[in-house]
Amino acid sequence: MDEALRKDYEDWVNKVQKELETNKDEWVERYGEYAKKMVANSAIFSEAKGQFNKIKPLYVYLTIGKVKDKELKFDLRYLGQSVGTIKVKDNIPKLSVDEKKNNSSIYFGYDLGAIKDEDWSKGPNAKKFRDYYINHATGAPRQEEHMVESALFSELEKTTSVNKTLCGIQPVSFENTRIHMKTALKASAAKHDDVEQSKTGGEVDILCRRKIGNKSRLVVIEVKDENIKKESFDAAMKQAISYAVFISELIHSDAGKDWMKIWGMENQIKEKYVIDCVVAMPKGDTEPSYAGEQIEIPGTGDKLELHYMILQSDLEEMKSGTVKFEHSFGIKNK
């Protein structure tokens, strides 16, 4: 990585920190409440999730909002796109497909119509719904980036080294369910100098834990479905950096202990911490200019380590949940 790019990233870290200083008390308190409620509600979500089985190629997701509000509603996604929900009430999981999600028919050929609160295990339409996505669905999601993200989730979720491209890494989940880490910042790779704080905020595409010896660190992965000059590896890294700086600030806030517990990191140090920032995108117009270099976060003692994943599987392979990639983990200072 040349000095000009390093300086650009260091300036970006400063810019993100400055943005996070604005209304800091408000977002720290808000994320503290998120964490407390998630910790308090973890047992009931674990019990609810145990009432139904995951059935590939459908994957189950949760949102921080649902968890904090104790709303036992799980999102069902096919190739990363939401196609239905399961709500657990009185220990009975029920499937709903509303009109909006029913519009997925234009992407996957689904024509069963809307479904409202039907028993997931015994309902006739629920059985047809499962059969359709297991055996008959065609096409691709509205946003191919969601399919790439889902395939990468599946690859990183593998629990054995057999056919796993990168060992020692696992996505952070909530009660064994996929979840996206919400952030107080919105950032964009297309708008290179755009980062702002907002109530809706942004989301880390995939937040992982990576084990290195007897220590673990968090990994912020920004996923793209194409590799073009206006959204290059180097530009997309700013998005990953933005979210990683937010994570660092959260770790050092009063809510840090609860968040580390949620992330499965409660036994890790909170000083001079390293967060991996990763851009995952296919081969294309650009190449990454980094491979393991570190950048300090002023005032925290933390560092960001910059990495890439160059996705080598085509979209058809990703539809089956297969994605292989070349990566920079283990490489230092290209």
Image (cartoon, grey):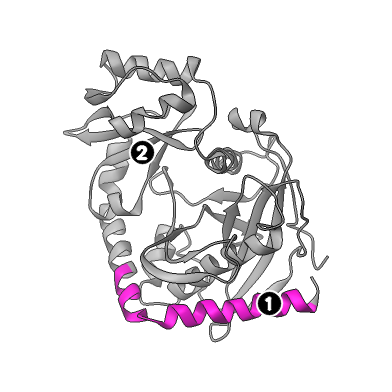
Q: For this rendering, which residue is in front, 33 or 282? A: 282
Taking the magenta stretch, the answer to whether it contains residue 138 is no
Q: Residues within 10 Å of mark 2 (few under 14, many from 20)?
A: many
State the extent of the magenta-drawn residues as a range.
3-30
Q: Residues within 10 Å of mark 1 (few under 14, many from 20)?
A: few
Identified at 66% across, 60% down, the residue is 213
Query: Which quadrant holds the C terminus?
Result: bottom right
Q: Which residue is mark 2?
A: 75
Most common SS among magenta residues = helix
Q: Quick check: 158 left or right of 120?
A: right
> Can the viewer see residue 56 in this picture?
no
- Amino acid of disc 1: Asp
Q: Is residue 262 above or below residue 250?
A: above
Q: Position of residue 152 (x, y in %)?
A: 60, 42
Q: Position of residue 215 (x, y in %)?
A: 60, 63
Q: Position of residue 311 (x, y in %)?
A: 70, 44
Answer with mark 1 or mark 2, whichever residue precedes in sequence: 1
Q: Quick check: 325 left or right of 260?
A: right
**Labels 1 & 2 near each other (Cβ < 8 A):** no
Q: Secondary structure at mark 1?
A: helix
Q: Is residue 230 above or below residue 244?
A: above
Q: Secondary structure at mark 2?
A: strand
Q: Which residue is mark 1?
A: 8
Mark number for residue 301? none
Q: For this rendering, which residue is in front, 278 or 256? A: 278
- Amino acid of disc 2: Asp
Give residue 287's quadrant in the image: bottom right
Q: For this rendering, which residue is in front, 230 or 278? A: 230
Taking the magenta stretch, the answer to whether it contains residue 29 is yes
Q: Position of residue 227 (x, y in %)?
A: 70, 49
Q: Quick check: 294 left or right of 106?
A: right
Identified at 76% across, 63% down, the residue is 291
